Amino acid sequence: MGKEWLSLKDAAALLGVHPGTVRLWSNKGLLPVHLTQGGHRRYLRRELELWLASRQGPEPEAMMNSVLQNVRLQVAEGRLNAEPWYARLDETARAQYRQSAHALFRALLAFLADDHGSLAEAHAIGYEYASRARRYGLSCMEAVQAFLFFRSLMIEAILSISHPSNRAVYEMLPKIQTFTDTILLRLLETYQVLENHHG
């Protein structure tokens, strides 16, 4: 088929997204795709270049895939181990915090993708952060530090994968702020209720 025809992996490289994202876009009919007789996806380079030129910025799914990869890398580099609140946790608690970071990103992705996004998930995450912190003996301040750590990582990662001229990213920031502020307020409210109830 030559260089004009690209595999799913090549298309992902050209678009700068994860292959899973290209598959998702293809399945949703968002990306021009051709199927071979064997059922394999093939992409015309010129069609993808035109599609890319017509876009203002990356889709939220693509962006969040990149963010997750970036965050995993930063956490693996030991930033998490340098956090005093993290040092106080046993391995089970640490695993739960790492897992909840991924839940946070997935929930934010769903919120960004929905024009009428509900903040119910943000309330649930705030409650979860507060109750987990209490369960593992972290103070309210440490619970907030844990959340702010993951929020900072996420925002740094979003900005690091974005071109400064990409308006779509900056248009997303107010929604990200609304979602994460809701989590923080719910965390503080829940922690206070738990303290009063058990204190």
Image: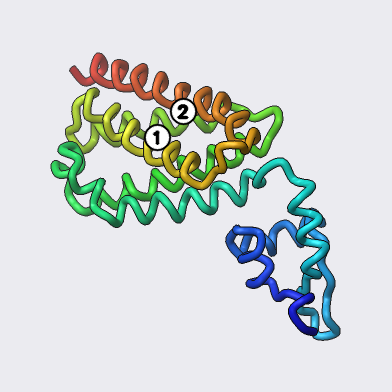
**What number is the disc on residue 151?**
1
| Observer-nearest of 133 and 42 | 42
Q: Are marks 1 and 2 in contact (CB under 8 Å)?
A: yes
Q: At x 46% / y 51%, what residue is drawn?
A: 68
In the displayed structure, 28 sits above or below 176; it is below
Q: Helix or strand or loop: what does disc 1 sit on?
A: helix
Q: Position of residue 74 (x, y in %)?
A: 33, 51
Residue 136 figure quarter: top left
Q: Which residue is mark 2?
A: 180
Viewer can see residue 93: no
Q: At x 17% / y 33%, what residue is drawn?
A: 137
Scheme by which the image is coloured:
rainbow
Quadrant holding the C terminus: top left
Quadrant holding the N terminus: bottom right
Instruction: Compare marks 1 and 2 and give the one earlier in the sequence.
Output: 1
Q: Helix or strand or loop: what does disc 2 sit on?
A: helix
Q: Amino acid at mark 2?
A: Thr
Q: Position of residue 180 (x, y in %)?
A: 46, 28
Q: Residues within 10 Å of mark 1 (few under 14, many from 20)?
A: many
Q: Amino acid at mark 1?
A: Arg
Number of numbered discs on residues = 2
Viewer can see residue 34: yes
Q: At x 79% / y 47%, what residue is drawn?
A: 54
Q: Is residue 185 left or right of residue 136?
A: right
| Observer-nearest of 56 and 73 | 56
